[in-house]
């Protein structure tokens, strides 16, 4: 993957997170505060916990940090896959957001 391809895919992912937060806030009581600075999106939940998603451009990876730990994702087989086999990005984000918000939340591409 070229740097340009990575940035195109990564930007779409960050935008989908922001749009997902807007949709969730409109349809649930989750009240997620989403802040984007450059290649990083910080989701802050009512209880003060956070999930941080940021781009690692030199590695062509997306990193996700949550209460449960840190995850690294690379684009493979038409999706963002954990580099250690822990699953797909949106499923990991959804699971962690659900745990941290205390509500069933779903993020998708």
Image (cartoon, rainbow, N blue to C red):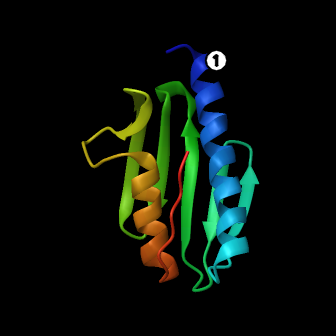
* Crowd class of label 1 (few under 14; some 14 to 19; many from 20; radius 10 Å): few
Asked whether residue 61 is in view, the answer is yes
Identify the residue at horizontal 70%, vertical 54% (top origin): 19
Residue most extreme to the top: 2
Identify the residue at horizontal 64%, vertical 69% (top origin): 24
Left or right, 69 with reference to 24? left
Q: Quadrant of residue 57?
A: top right
- For the C terminus, the image quarter is top right
Left or right, 40 with reference to 50? right
Q: Is residue 79 above or below residue 64?
A: above
Task: Depth check: give the residue in front, 55 or 9.
Answer: 9
Q: Position of residue 97 (x, y in %)?
A: 49, 69
Q: Position of residue 44 (x, y in %)?
A: 63, 72
Task: Depth check: give the residue in front, 67 or 21.
Answer: 21
Q: Is residue 7 above or below residue 109?
A: above
Residue most extreme to the left: 85
Task: Depth check: give the residue in front, 8 or 77.
Answer: 77
Secondary structure beneath dot 1 equals helix
Q: Position of residue 8 (x, y in %)?
A: 65, 26
Q: Which residue is mark 1?
A: 4
Identify the residue at horizontal 52%, vertical 79% (top origin): 101
Asked whether residue 32 is in view, the answer is no
Left or right, 67 with reference to 30? left
Q: Position of residue 60 (x, y in %)?
A: 49, 27
Task: Depth check: give the residue in front, 89 or 107.
Answer: 107
Identify the residue at horizontal 75%, vertical 50% (top origin): 37
């Amino acid at each position: 993957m070229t740097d340009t391809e990575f940035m195109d895919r990564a930007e779409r992912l960050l935008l989908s997170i922001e749009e997902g937060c807007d949709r969730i806030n409109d349809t649930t009581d989750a009240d997620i505060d989403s802040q984007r600075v450059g290649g990083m999106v910080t989701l802050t939940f009512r209880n003060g916990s956070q999930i941080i998603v940021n781009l690692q451009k030199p590695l062509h990876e997306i990193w996700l940090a949550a209460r449960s730990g840190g995850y690294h994702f690379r684009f493979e087989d038409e999706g963002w896959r954990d580099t250690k086999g822990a699953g797909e990005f949106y499923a990991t984000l959804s699971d962690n957001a659900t745990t941290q918000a205390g509500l069933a939340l779903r993020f998708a591409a």
